[in-house]
Image: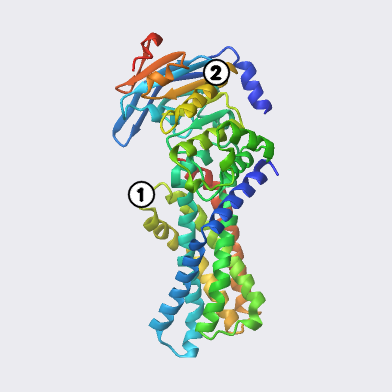
């Protein structure tokens, strides 16, 4: 904790995310060819691009799940390659797949997340989170019976157990109903307002425009920064 | 319980709870192990003396094959719905994932052995009652090394496409010395060489256990990365 605090103090004036010349390939295909990206603290960035343009790859690199073949990533001043745990400690990542355990109940999935996150197994906290994501009545039901939207709500709940300062959302509006979409945007805004940073990879600019402060597009493996007022075009 | 001990407990608890809920997994693996004993027993078609000689090998082969199913299943659960990524994003030492899975896999394989040994005793008419305790000791030592390597190689092959095939291809050659020691220790016990060969082979097993546990623990965090 002290280590993270030291990083925070030293990097208080730095942008939240600094990506420099990041390149990543799968076999012989270069998906990212030298991405440069800066995300300010307290902001929500909408990341767009065609299917296969590398949005998810970039998010996975930011999340420390993938290493770039070239380039560097700094999050709140910490080098992602050298200090991945510093980043994981403050990260919330809503991926395509919910990453839940089918044979555990909703409550047990959150209990597991609490234990893995090094938190106390506080029932009240889990109840509050389940209430917020609209799954209070299903807390004792196994995830196997959940719809795609319910799974994503629970995955979002898992993030809320340890409110992150870096929130990465990959196609967050898929599978959610209107209330779920509002909840996603609410969580994104809260994270930014705490001084964190949010990156939303999405095709759905109409929904992202409600919450975003900046927009960038990946084209041919490179970042093209877009003016925000282009957002909102359906 | 928090910290690394809490994470280890969480992983083991999660795997065992999921396994307990999906009862069919254990039942099918135990049935499979029993079937191996039956089929090999029929294939050998030997008299009682010959069966007593080959029984330790058949017994460990049944444990080996059923254990591989358990190891594969252990990581399949993580791959379902992207749970492995979520697991890797928790801060802390990733070796706690290895230790947690090791505990859960050990419990599962030990339970299979609790079923398999009596079945083998009945099928092959093995006199196990009077050597129950030392036999349990040999199985304990053999299972620790087996599960340590199995858990490690299952992690290594978990992201590969043909993991079900690759796991035994990677694992079995590495297990040869351990299995030799386990089969010989079991054979020595069954032939009433309680204080002789069984003790020596058990020491060999203990050495393999230490080597496999240490090596897998040290290297695990590199193999679990994508």
The image position of residue A2, as x and y in percent, is 68, 26
Q: Residue at x 64, y 71 (%)?
A: B137
The image position of residue A28, as x and y in percent, is 29, 34
**Position of A141 compared to A174: left or right?**
right
In depth, the one of A45 and B46 nearer the eye is A45
Q: Quadrant of residue A42?
A: top right
The chain carrying label 2 is: A
Quadrant of image for the N terminus of chain B:
top right
Same chain, marks 2 and 1?
no
The residue carrying mark 1 is B161
Q: How many marks?
A: 2
The chain carrying label 1 is: B
**Residue B138, labelled with which disc?**
none
How far, Cα to Cα, is label 2 from label 1? 39 Å
In depth, the one of A142 and A109 nearer the eye is A142
Q: Are marks 2 and 1 in contact (CB under 8 Å)?
A: no
The residue carrying mark 2 is A192
């Amino acid at each position: 904790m002290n280590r993270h605090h030291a990083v925070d103090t030293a990097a208080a004036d730095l942008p939240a995310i600094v990506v420099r010349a990041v390149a990543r390939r799968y076999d012989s295909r270069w998906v990212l060819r030298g991405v440069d990206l800066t995300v300010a603290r307290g902001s929500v960035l909408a990341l767009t691009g065609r299917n296969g343009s590398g949005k998810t790859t970039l998010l996975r690199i930011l999340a420390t799940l993938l290493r770039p073949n070239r380039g560097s990533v700094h999050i709140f001043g910490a080098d992602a390659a050298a200090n991945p745990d510093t980043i994981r400690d403050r990260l919330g990542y809503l991926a395509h797949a919910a990453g839940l355990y089918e044979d555990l109940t909703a409550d047990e999935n959150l209990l597991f997340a609490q234990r893995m996150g090094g938190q106390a197994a506080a029932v009240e906290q889990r109840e509050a989170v389940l209430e917020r994501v609209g799954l209070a009545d299903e807390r004792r039901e196994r995830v196997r019976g959940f719809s795609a939207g319910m799974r994503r709500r629970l995955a979002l709940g898992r993030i809320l157990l340890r409110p992150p300062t870096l929130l990465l959302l990959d196609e967050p509006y898929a599978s959610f109903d209107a209330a779920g979409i509002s909840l996603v945007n609410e969580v994104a805004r809260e994270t930014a307002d705490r001084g964190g940073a949010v990156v939303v990879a999405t095709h759905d600019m109409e929904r992202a425009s409600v919450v975003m402060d900046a927009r960038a597009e990946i084209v041919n493996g490179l970042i093209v920064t877009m003016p925000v007022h282009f957002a909102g075009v359906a | 319980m928090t910290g690394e001990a809490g994470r280890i407990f969480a992983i083991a608890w999660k795997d065992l709870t999921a396994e307990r809920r999906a009862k069919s997994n254990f039942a099918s693996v135990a049935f499979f192990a029993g079937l191996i004993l039956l089929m090999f027993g029929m294939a050998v078609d030997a008299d009682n003396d010959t069966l007593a000689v080959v029984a330790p090998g058949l017994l460990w082969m049944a444990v080996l094959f059923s254990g591989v199913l358990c190891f594969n299943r252990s990581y399949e659960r993580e791959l379902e719905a992207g749970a492995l990524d979520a697991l890797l994003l928790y801060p802390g030492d990733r070796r706690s994932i290895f230790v947690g899975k090791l505990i859960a896999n050990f419990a599962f394989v030990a339970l299979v052995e609790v079923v398999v040994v009596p079945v083998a005793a009945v099928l092959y008419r093995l006199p196990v009652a009077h050597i129950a305790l030392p036999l349990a000791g040999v199985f304990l030592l053999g299972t620790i090394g087996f599960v340590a390597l199995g858990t490690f190689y299952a992690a290594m092959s978990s992201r590969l496409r043909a993991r079900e095939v690759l796991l035994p291809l990677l694992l079995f050659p590495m297990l040869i010395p351990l299995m030799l020691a386990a089969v010989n220790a079991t054979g020595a016990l069954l032939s009433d060489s309680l204080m002789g060969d069984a003790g020596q082979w058990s020491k060999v097993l203990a050495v393999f256990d230490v080597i496999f546990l240490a090596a897998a623990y040290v290297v695990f965090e590199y193999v679990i990365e994508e």
